[in-house]
């Protein structure tokens, strides 16, 4: 089952006075959909899931499902470095009616490739909701090898991967190792077109928080055969993408959304507002791109 084709925004979780700002989240969701985004990923890395309580996490996903009302697929982040907790969260989000689950590799305690297979298989056996596995060794310290992806892809409930290794050779090897019905999504905004060129279906995007229409259009241009225009768009957004990662995600993108008048610039420690130099760069790129 392909959960989506195109661009899925890994949406931020707005905060206000230390609490989840649901009115702002609702407006963001409606704006994303009006701009043509193809899916919403809620409570992922960009959504600061690691500093949400389980209660907040579940309520935020529930709010998102209800606000979206079936207009696009909703994919809930349910990853954990504790397999039992990942099973618990996956079951909770499944009960809320999410269309898919995004499961990052276990972090900090880490594990072997054998452990990854057991981890993901245990979760996939516990739910019926389709699962996208998420490989981002730069954050977790654990890479999902192409051979492990190929093994996990045999599970009927594991339908795709968000690949954020930044290693195009690894992406190519994964593409060679899986069947055509296994979805390959870019986890790096600057590598969307290269991934599409080897059979990818789209991107789970951070920069899509601020330019959802352009990210959606870029993917669709490529998939419809206008590869030259897709490449032009990828290059045109490069400096903006760089600015969104000048400090650790989602610090810059929340600052950008604040500059665009969409959310408060509020984080949860250990994340904090960007320094002055970063703010200047973020503002400059927003101006140059025509966003403010």
Image: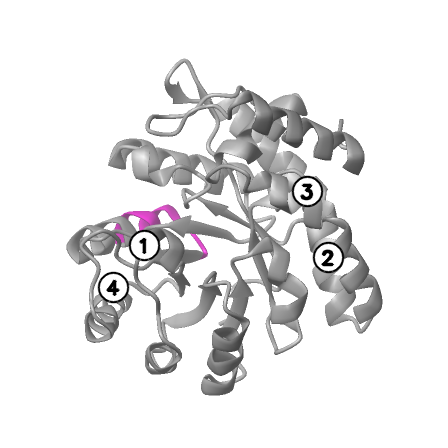
- Coordinates of residue 29 in the picture (x, y in percent): 58, 37
Q: Nearer the viewer, mark 4 or mark 2?
A: 2
Left or right of 20, for residue 23: right
Check if residue 95 falls in the magenta segment. yes
- The magenta-colored residue range is 91-99
Other residues around mark 4 within 10 Å, as few (<14) / some (14–19) / many (≥20): many
Q: Are marks 3 and 4 in contact (CB under 8 Å)?
A: no
Calculate the distance from the C-alpha at mark 4 to the C-alpha at mark 1: 18 Å
Dot 3 or dot 2, earlier in sequence:
2
Question: Which residue is drawn at the image coordinates 46% and 32% (left, top)?
Answer: 13
Q: Are marks 2 and 1 in contact (CB under 8 Å)?
A: no
Calculate the distance from the C-alpha at mark 2 to the C-alpha at mark 1: 27 Å
Question: Which residue is drawn at the image coordinates 24% and 53% (left, top)?
Answer: 86
Calculate the distance from the C-alpha at mark 4 to the C-alpha at mark 2: 35 Å
Label 1 residue SS: helix
Other residues around mark 1 within 10 Å, as few (<14) / some (14–19) / many (≥20): some
Q: Are marks 3 and 2 in contact (CB under 8 Å)?
A: no
Q: Nearer the viewer, mark 4 or mark 1?
A: 1
Q: Which residue is mark 3?
A: 240
Left or right of 218, for residue 40: left
Q: Choose between 68 and 24: the one closer to the eye.
A: 24
Label 3 residue SS: helix
Calculate the distance from the C-alpha at mark 1 to the C-alpha at mark 3: 25 Å
Label 2 residue SS: helix
Q: Which residue is mark 2?
A: 234
Calculate the distance from the C-alpha at mark 3 to the C-alpha at mark 4: 36 Å
């Amino acid at each position: 089952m392909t959960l989506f084709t195109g661009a899925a925004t890994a949406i931020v979780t707005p905060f206000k006075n230390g609490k989840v700002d649901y009115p702002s989240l609702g407006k963001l969701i409606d704006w994303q959909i009006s701009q043509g985004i193809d899916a919403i990923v809620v409570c992922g890395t960009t959504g600061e899931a690691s500093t949400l309580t389980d209660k907040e996490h579940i309520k935020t996903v529930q709010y998102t499902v209800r606000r979206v009302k079936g207009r696009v697929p909703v994919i809930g982040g349910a990853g954990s470095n504790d397999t039992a907790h990942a099973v618990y969260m996956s079951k909770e989000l499944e009960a809320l009616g999410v269309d898919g689950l995004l499961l990052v590799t276990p972090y900090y305690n880490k594990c072997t490739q054998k452990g990854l297979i057991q981890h993901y298989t245990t979760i996939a056996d516990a739910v019926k909701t389709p699962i996208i596995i998420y490989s981002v060794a730069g954050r977790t310290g654990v890479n999902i090898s192409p051979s492990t992806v190929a093994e996990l892809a045999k599970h009927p409930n594991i339908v795709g991967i968000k690949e954020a290794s930044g290693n195009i050779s690894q992406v190519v090897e994964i593409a060679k190792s899986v069947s055509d019905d296994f979805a390959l999504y870019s986890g790096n905004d600057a590598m969307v077109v290269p991934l599409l060129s080897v059979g990818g279906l789209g991107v789970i995007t951070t920069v899509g928080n601020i330019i959802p229409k352009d990210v959606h259009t870029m993917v669709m241009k490529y998939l419809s055969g206008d590869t030259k225009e897709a490449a032009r768009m990828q290059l045109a957004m490069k400096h903006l993408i760089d600015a969104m990662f000048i400090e650790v995600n989602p610090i810059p993108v929340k600052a950008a959304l604040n500059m665009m008048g969409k959310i408060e610039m509020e984080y949860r420690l250990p994340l904090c507002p960007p320094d002055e130099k970063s703010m200047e760069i973020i503002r400059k790129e927003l101006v140059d791109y025509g966003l403010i």
